[in-house]
Image (cartoon, rainbow, N blue to C red):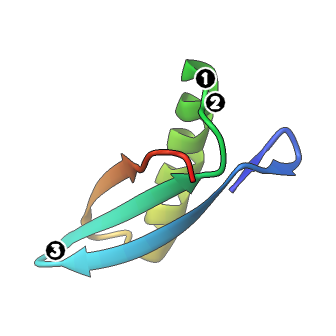
């Protein structure tokens, strides 16, 4: 995932029982505004990958 044109995180995607989960794996600690930006971007990914499922976005601790 990109923040200001730089790679800030990777993500994984999983579905189960009508729910889609995007897990964001950041490379460094995220500010509140950066986390919000990645949440918006992640929501767009979930809309594309699983438009009919319920959506959840999770964040892991930085690697």
Marks 3 and 1, the one that precedes in the sequence: 3
Residue 29 higher or lower than 50, as above or below: above
| Foreground residue among 8 and 42 | 8
Asked whether the residues under the numbered discs 1 and 2 touch, taking CB atoms below 8 Å apart as contact, a structural biologist would say yes
Placement of the N terminus among the 4 image quadrants: bottom right
Q: Quadrant of residue 11?
A: bottom right
Q: CA distance from mark 1 to mark 2?
A: 5 Å
Residue at (26% x, 78% y) in the render: 15
- The percent position of residue 3, horizontal first and vertical second, equals 76, 42
Drawn side of residue 26 relative to residue 51, left or right: right
Write down the residue under mark 3: 18
Write down the residue under mark 2: 34
* Label 3 CA crowd tier, 10 Å (few <14, some 14–19, many 20+): few
Write down the residue under mark 1: 31
Among all residues in the image, which is located at the extreme right?
5
The secondary structure type at the circle numbered 1 is loop
Marks 3 and 2, the one that precedes in the sequence: 3
The secondary structure type at the circle numbered 2 is helix
Residue 58 higher or lower than 46, as above or below: above
Q: Quadrant of residue 35?
A: top right
């Amino acid at each position: 995932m990109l923040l200001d044109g730089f790679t800030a995180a990777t993500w994984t995607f999983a579905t189960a029982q009508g729910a889609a989960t995007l897990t964001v794996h950041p490379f460094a600690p995220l500010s509140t505004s950066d986390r919000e930006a990645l949440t918006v971007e992640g929501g767009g990914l979930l809309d594309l990958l699983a438009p009919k499922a319920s959506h959840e976005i999770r964040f892991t601790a930085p690697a």
